[in-house]
Amino acid sequence: MSTPAKERDPRRGEKLGWAGGFFGSSLWIAVLGVLMLYWGEVVPGLIAFGLYVISLVLLYLLLPWRNPERPMALLLAGTMAPIFGAIGLTVFYFFVYTDPTEQGLQPWSFLWITMFVPLFFRFGKRRWSDGERG
């Protein structure tokens, strides 16, 4: 007698997209840590690795299906915090330890950060549990 096939999770794609997207978007922080250590910058390199570990822990703790009643914008803000911290570390490193104009950085170069703002408006008060209600 065979056992019945395991029922497939209807929101599996959403879960993979959320977790995989944030894992992939924070992977550059580990690469940044490796580069800084290679350049001999031990403290910034270790800070980058610490931010990467924090991003993985927050990713796990703030998965929307683990917190179905929390607004997604709040979960998004929590998982983005280490990424913004790593951006701050990078900016600080390049403006303090190097000449930013040699790197091609200008103050207006950071306007691309504004692309994250619409994400918070898009998710707004939406919750993971909203998708489970028919």
Image (cartoon, rainbow, N blue to C red):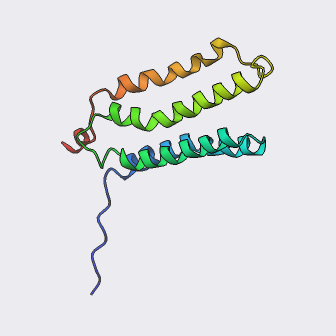
Q: Nearer the viewer, residue 94 or 27?
A: 94
The residue sitting at 77% across, 42% down in the picture is 40
Q: Nearer the viewer, residue 6 or 67?
A: 67
10 in relation to 45, above or below: below
Q: Is residue 58 left or right of residue 93?
A: left
Q: Position of residue 3 (x, y in %)?
A: 28, 80
Q: Quadrant of the C terminus?
A: top left
* Number of numbered discs overlaid on the protein picture: 0
Q: Nearer the viewer, residue 86 or 123?
A: 86
Using the rendered view, name the quadrant where residue 126 is placed: top left
Using the rendered view, name the quadrant where residue 133 is placed: top left
114 in relation to 90, above or below: above
Return the residue found at the far front. 43
The residue sitting at 74% across, 26% down in the picture is 97
Using the rendered view, name the quadrant where residue 105 is placed: top right
2 in relation to 70, above or below: below
Question: Can see residue 110?
Answer: yes
Q: Position of residue 54 (x, y in %)?
A: 48, 45
Q: Position of residue 129 (x, y in %)?
A: 23, 42
Q: Quadrant of the N terminus?
A: bottom left
Return the residue found at the far right. 102
Q: Position of residue 41 (x, y in %)?
A: 73, 40
Question: Can see residue 20?
Answer: no
Q: Nearer the viewer, residue 33 or 76?
A: 33
Return the residue found at the far left. 133
The residue sitting at 44% across, 21% down in the picture is 117
Q: Is residue 18 left or right of residue 30?
A: left
